Image (tube, helix red, strand yellow):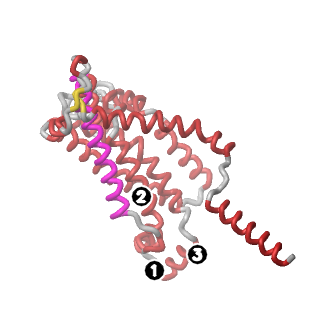
């Protein structure tokens, strides 16, 4: 009987180990998530693979008889020799640097003010108001910008006129048109930065803040050594999200300036659209899009490497 019990225990042990090695598949759960997985593959992965495939082909919409010819890295070489590509990329990166610095600074300032306020009704009203610009579509924001920056009856020139400044041709001057795009982007996405920073500040333990205030009365010292470490993960996440947004930003500048005057506000996404749907060279446009994706990934990795810090690592 003892031998039979040992054999049964051994069999049960092997059965348990086999189930651990090969876990049972929950077919119901798999069936529930498959529609989402299929939609993700169709919407996300397939267009990416198709764009990568086109980037190695000659694909002209106005001359379809030669489409599909494999050209290797010829499209990428064309992109790297294109001065307009580099100038539009330079404008985009310049805008990215400016909006990141301004939005993070303003977002932190707004979050600190809300976090330090004891007026709950005011805090609730401000938080609600912060959501409004984020909820607006970029195309609508661009149309609002056309009205705000109009030279003759725009709100911006009206406000400047109250302090004695002459009317500015915001959308007619190359430099000021770019400034108008940057101001519009800052207006729309600074609230997003403020909400992220506010949620990060909510993680700071109150006893740690009180202990720091007992050691020093300097508010900057408390912020730098107590609150800022808790803000760094949120800052890093915001930088990654906004970098991807700015690099693919199309709707707002297209409706606001359409890349003009001339090509002075033609960001990289507008140039890719022009290359693909006005010059009709989808191969080169796909190569530009792939290079832009690689740049976005590299910047995201750099942000994580140089900016991401947890409170425990400080």
The residue wearing badge 1 is: 216
- Outermost residue toward the right? 1
Q: Position of residue 192 (x, y in %)?
A: 46, 48
298 and 151: which is toward the camera: 298
Q: Position of residue 214 (x, y in %)?
A: 52, 81
Viewport quadrant of the N terminus: bottom right
**Residue 275 seen from this side:** yes
**Cα distance in 3D space between marks 1 and 3:** 14 Å
Q: Position of residue 30 (x, y in %)?
A: 63, 43
Residue 24 on the magenta span: no
Q: Dot 1, crowdedness within 10 Å: few (<14), some or many (≥20)?
A: few
**Residue at image location 42% in from the left, 52% down from the top:** 238
Viewport quadrant of the C terminus: bottom left
The part of the chain drawn in magenta is 278-307
What kind of secondary structure does the magenta stretch mostly adopt?
helix
Image quadrant where residue 90 sits: top left
Left or right of 138, for residue 273: left
**Cα distance in 3D space between marks 3 and 2:** 23 Å
Foreground label between 1 and 3 = 3
Foreground label between 2 and 1 = 2
**Residue at image location 25% in from the left, 37% down from the top:** 287
Picture disc at residue 164: none
**Residue 167 seen from this side:** no
Foreground label between 3 and 2 = 2
Picture disc at residue 235: 2
The residue wearing badge 3 is: 207
Question: Quick check: marks 1 and 3 in contact, CB under 8 Å?
Answer: no
SS of the residue under disc 3 = helix
SS of the residue under disc 1 = loop
């Amino acid at each position: 009987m003892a031998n039979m019990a040992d054999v049964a225990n051994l069999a049960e042990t092997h059965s348990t180990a086999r189930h651990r090695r090969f876990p049972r598949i929950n077919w119901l759960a798999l069936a529930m998530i498959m529609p989402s997985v299929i939609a993700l593959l169709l919407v996300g992965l397939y267009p990416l693979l198709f764009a990568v495939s086109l980037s190695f082909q000659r694909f002209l919409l106005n001359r379809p008889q030669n489409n599909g010819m494999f050209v290797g890295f010829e499209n990428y070489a064309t992109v790297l020799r294109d001065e307009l590509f580099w100038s539009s990329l330079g404008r985009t990166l310049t805008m990215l640097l400016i909006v990141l610095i301004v939005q993070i600074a303003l977002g932190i300032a707004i979050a600190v003010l809300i976090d330090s306020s004891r007026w709950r009704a005011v805090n609730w009203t401000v938080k609600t108001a912060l959501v409004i610009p984020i909820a607006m579509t970029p195309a609508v924001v661009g149309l609002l910008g056309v009205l705000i920056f109009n030279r003759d009856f725009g709100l911006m020139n009206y406000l400047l006129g109250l302090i004695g400044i002459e009317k500015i041709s915001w959308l007619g001057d190359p430099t000021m048109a770019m400034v108008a795009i940057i101001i519009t982007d800052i207006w729309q996405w600074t609230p997003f930065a403020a909400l992220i920073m506010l949620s990060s500040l909510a993680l700071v333990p109150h006893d740690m803040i009180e202990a720091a205030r007992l050691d020093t009365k300097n508010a900057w010292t408390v912020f730098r050594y107590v609150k800022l470490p808790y803000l760094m993960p949120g800052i890093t996440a915001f930088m990654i999200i906004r970098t991807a947004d700015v690099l693919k930003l199309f709707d707002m500048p297209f409706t606001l300036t359409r890349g003009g005057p001339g090509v002075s506000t033609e960001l990289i996404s507008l140039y890719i659209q022009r290359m693909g749907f006005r010059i009709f060279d989808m191969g080169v446009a796909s190569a530009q899009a792939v290079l832009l994706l690689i740049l976005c990934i590299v910047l995201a990795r750099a942000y994580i490497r140089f900016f991401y810090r947890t409170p425990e690592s400080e």
